Amino acid sequence: MSASFDYRQVLSPSFVETGSYRGDGIAQALGAGFETVHSIEIADHWINHCRQRFAREIADGRLVLWQGDTLDVLPRVIAHLSRPATFWLDAHSHPHNTGTEKSAVNCPLYHELGAIAASPIRSHRVLIDDLRLITDPRSWGGHDVTFSGMLERLRAINSNYAFAFLDGLIEKDVLVARVETGMRTDQATLDAFLSDPLSQSIRSARSALACEVDPMSRTVFPRI
């Protein structure tokens, strides 16, 4: 999914996205000036859509589309990187994904962060979308990702990461981890996510405005 901020704020030689969907994030990354964009998508429909939408960029070598489960594909993408990259992590289950188009886990974020931590490059920029849903364990059919667990795994990539928040579908819905001179952690927002239950409840309620409910399972899914 695309975001409401300017991707030039997080420019690196390469952009790596998990979850291509309609390709709006790809378009933003290409427009921001990333030299190479890698995007991973598990669903046949969306991978074919993006192949048609970005046929010229694929032919030019600026865009590489990878089809498959991020659990398997992301480590292969990372193996191709020789310089720091910007990662946009937005993979999760969707009610329309079934069979081979469904990942082994509803929210593969921990696996993705583990794959990045295995890279010898310690200065990757990592952006995590959908904080409003990640902080709610009922999202995407249920998951075990927590905000504190996410921070722990980010610090395993680089203990010197500073954390900031950018606007996504709602305000401060994207976590940014990066190591740069003068970069300071937004500690107030970080503490709110870690320790303020009321703040989490409010964010979960707000997320309902951007979600739909599967009437069969009563599972909440994002309108991505």
Image: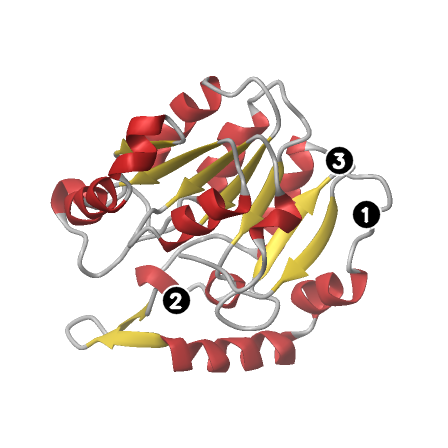
- Looking at numbered disc 1 in the image, what kind of residue is underneath it? Met
- Looking at numbered disc 3 in the image, what kind of residue is underneath it? Ser
- Residue 84 bears which disc, if any? none
Q: Quadrant of residue 126?
A: top right
As helix, strand or loop, the secondary structure at mark 2 comes to: loop
Percent of width and height locating residue 107: 39, 50
Percent of width and height locating residue 16: 46, 36
Residue at coordinates 48% horizontally, 47% vertically from top-left? 31
Residue at coordinates 57% horizontally, 30% vertically from top-left? 13
- Quick check: 14 left or right of 160? left
- Between residues 37 and 56, which one lies in front from this camera angle? 56
Dot 2 crowding, Cα within 10 Å, few <14, some 14–19, many 20+? some
- Looking at numbered disc 2 in the image, what kind of residue is underneath it? Arg
Q: Which residue is mark 2?
A: 138
Q: Which residue is mark 3?
A: 159
As helix, strand or loop, the secondary structure at mark 1 comes to: loop
